[in-house]
Image (spheres, rainbow, N blue to C red):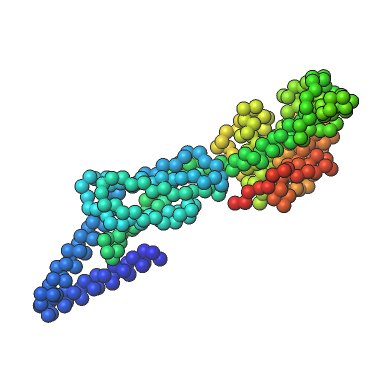
Amino acid sequence: MEKAKDYFINFVLFLIYFVIVFFALVFNNSLGWFLLAFFTLYVSWSVFSLSTFLKKLSVTCTVQPVVYRKKSIQVIFSIAKKRAFSFPLPRLQIVFPEIFAEKKQEILILTNKPQEVQVLWQPKERGFHEALTVIFTAYDSLGLFRKRTRRELSFPVTVLPAFHKTQAETLQRVLEKKQQLNAYQKGLDFREHRSYRPGDSFNRIDWKLSAHSQEWLYREYEYQEEEYSPLLCFWGSPSLKFDHLLDLYFSLWHLRKEKQPELLILGDRIFHGKDPGYTYFASLNAGDEKTFLAHLKKQAKKQIVLFIPAHSPEVSEAVETLSKDRTVYLVYFAEKQIMIQEKDKVCSLPGGEWIDD
């Protein structure tokens, strides 16, 4: 549509030019010849300068190689002339792809000094980008003539799941408390008393000693964290909430990466280990959940944190099977709120609302 519009404008301008030529030849007066000379020079200058400039235009794009979904970043386009001596260009319009917040920008290029154009980009989908198509439209001084060209720019970017630090930290605290409580229930060696902290279990308060000390004293026990650390499992079934749960799962892994938690990621590709790598998260897709339970049964961990995008008969079967000799915590979204479920006990995560796209 834009191209047809440009052709129409150029056709009208050249039609006007030939009318002036006809006027000068028929009436043969000074005004006609002056208009003809002026318009001839202007048309020649505009057409030649626009075509030459766009061919000699150098454009580079600078962007972070790895970014998070839903996090705004700046993309910098550097625009310069390839040759020091070339025609100046009064106005250059840049049309960006739809993935950017800004659709168009205009700059003036009157000197040979490179200019930078900064554009805000908030990736909405995970994946890989290799190239970017940008449309450049050059205008003459009066805006009567224009020349358009497309450029394929190198754009090597990997988009990872969104990193929600606050939700991940809250979830981590809740899971650590459940992990310690589970270890305590199995019988451990007493270590020391300490002051009660908000969120601690009342079951571990030493009430007799607290009555004498005028403060609540909490029992600490010795336990090996590695022995009771849970298996973090992502149940990658097809769902509209797939990416939201993957964001949370990725955020928790990213937060605990130094502790090297054991992961089991079930999707179109199965991963079991401690570090799947960032590119794995960028390209993960949903898989056939009918095959997931077989992979879970092979795991030796006694505690499993299962991230489920949606409830299904396969999830219910997995929970029922695994709960016979293990502790299973379900993590899922219910009405945009993060929920944690252990058997029949369900609680919402404080401050655990998801962030809309």
The residue at the far bottom in this view is 27
Judging depth in this view, the residue of 273 and 45 nearest the camera is 45
Figure disc tally? 0
Q: Which residue appears at 31% of the width and 54% of the height? A: 108
Q: Which residue appears at 20% of the width and 60% of the height? A: 45
Q: Is residue 119 visible?
A: yes
Q: In this view, does 262 lie to the left or right of 341?
A: left
- In x, y percent, where is residue 80? 30, 46
Quarter of the image for the N terminus: give it.
bottom left
- In x, y percent, where is residue 165? 62, 39
Compared to residue 70, the image places residue 90 above or below, namely below
Q: In this view, does 15 lie to the left or right of 306?
A: left
Compared to residue 307, the image places residue 191 above or below, namely above
Judging depth in this view, the residue of 338 and 50 nearest the camera is 338
Q: Which residue appears at 31% of the width and 69% of the height? A: 9
Q: Is residue 210 left or right of residue 1?
A: right
Q: Which residue appears at 32% of the width and 67% of the height? A: 7
- In x, y percent, where is residue 255? 63, 33
